[in-house]
Amino acid sequence: MASMAALITLRNQFLVGSWPPHRRGVDDFNAGYPHKTARSHYSRHEGRMLVKAVVLCGGEGTRMRPFTYSQPKHLISIANRPAIEWIIDTIRDGGIDDIAVVVSPSTELIFRDYLQDGSCFSVNLSYIVQESPKGLAHAVQCAEEFVGSEPFLVYLGDNLVEHGVTELIRLFESQDCRAALSLFEVRSPSGFGVACISSQVVVRVVEKPAVPPSNLAICGIYVFSSDIFPAIERIEPSARGELEITDAIQRLIDDGGHVVPHVVTGWWKDVGKPKDFIEANQLLLESLELCVSGKVDSTSVVVGQVRVSSTARVERSRLQGPLLIGDESRVLDSSLRPNVSIGRGVKIRGCTLRDCVVLDGARMVNLGPIQEAFVGCNSDLEKREKADPMSFVIGDGSLIRL
C-alpha cells in the first residue's frame, strides 16, 4: 500500500512535511554558491557604523502548516539550506557579524541546537525570547538591551533578497537619518506595509491598506537608530491586537525624524507560504554553479546547471538544471527537470519532477509527472502498479486531492 505523510495538493502541487533537517555549516556550501565568506569592505562612517543585527523569528508560521507544527519555518530548507542560513550569510556579507535572533519560547531550544553560537557561519549569535507574539514592533523592542544606543539592522526571518543589505546599510551610514527602509515595487501592495516617498524621503507608511497610497511594499529589512524604541513605547496595539512596526516608523516621521527609502534591485521574496518556498528555491538555484562530483553513470544525461554532491548517486536518469542533489541521495530511472532541489539522504526512483523541493530523508517511487511539489523530511510517497488500497498519515491542516 502507498504511504504518504501530510500530503497537500494545490492543482498539481504536493506538500509533505516532517522534521528534523540535517545540520550543516558554511563550509558545506561554499563550493557551488556565489555568496561571499568574508565581510564586505567599503567606506564606512565611524559615527554611524552598524555592528549589530536583529533577525525576527518569533512568529508561529501559521501559513506554513503542517510543516510548522514540528519546526520553525526559518529552518525549512530552500535550495538545500534553511532560510535562516541564507539570511545569516546576507547579514555577514553586509559587514555585520554580531547577530541576535528573536525567537518564541517554544522554538528557542530548536534554534540554539541548530545554529549554536554562530561560529560555523563566521558570526556571533545570541538569542532573545519574545514571550508572546505581540507584533513586529514588540519583537524589535525585545532587542533593546542587545543593541543599546547603537543603530542596528532588523531583518524579518522570512525574507530573502538577491543583492543583500550592503546598499541599505551604506545609505543609512551616509545620511543623518533615524531609519532606512527597504522597499520593493509590487503589483498588489494591499497585502504589505506600504510606503509613500516625496523628494527621496519616506513621508508616510501604512500597514496593509485597503486602498494603497503607492506600490512600494516594505520588504521587512530595516535599519533603525535607537530612536525607534521610544517611538514603539508611544504606539498602541492595532485592530489586530499587535504593535505594528509601521506605526512605530510613522511615529518617528511624525516626530520629525528623517526616514530614507532604499528601493531594492533584483528579486525579493517573502517566504511565508509553501508556494513561496518553491518560488524562492527556483530563484536561488539560478545562481548555482555546475559541479557534478557524485557518481553519475554513463547512461544518465546531464544538461545545464546541475550540482550533484560527492556522496550522491545517479543512475539511468536525466538531469536538467538548474537543480541540486544533496549528500547521500540516490536518483534512479528518473527525470529531474529544472528547478528541483533534492536534500540529504533522499531516494527517488521512477519519478518525473519539475519545480520541486524534496527535503532530507524523503522517499519517492513511481510518481509523476509532478510539478511544484514541496516534500518534507522523511516523507514516503509511492505509487503501486496495482490498484491497492491507499494508506496515508496526514498532518493537521492538510488537504488531499487525488
Image: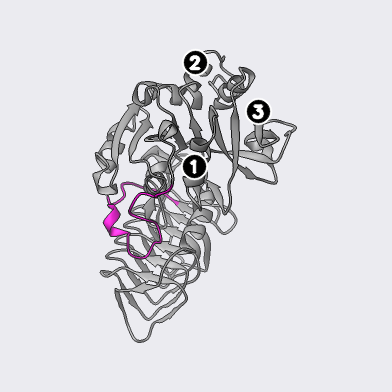
- The answer to whether any part of residue 34 appears in the image is yes
Q: Identify the element where label 2 is drawn.
A: helix
For disc 2, the neighbor class at 10 Å (few under 14, some 14 to 19, many from 20) is: few
State whether the magenta stretch is mostly helix, strand or loop.
loop
- In this rendering, the label closer to the viewer, 2 or 1: 1
In the displayed structure, 187 sits above or below 370; it is above
Residue 206's disc number: 3
Q: Is residue 307 left or right of residue 312?
A: right
- Residue 169 image position (x, y, % from top left): 48, 40
Residue 230's disc number: 2
Callout 3 touching callout 2 (CB < 8 Å): no
Q: Identify the element where label 1 is drawn.
A: helix
Q: Is residue 240 left or right of residue 33?
A: right
Mark 1 or mark 2, which is nearer the start of the sequence? Answer: 1
For disc 3, the neighbor class at 10 Å (few under 14, some 14 to 19, many from 20) is: many
Q: Label 1: which residue?
A: 170
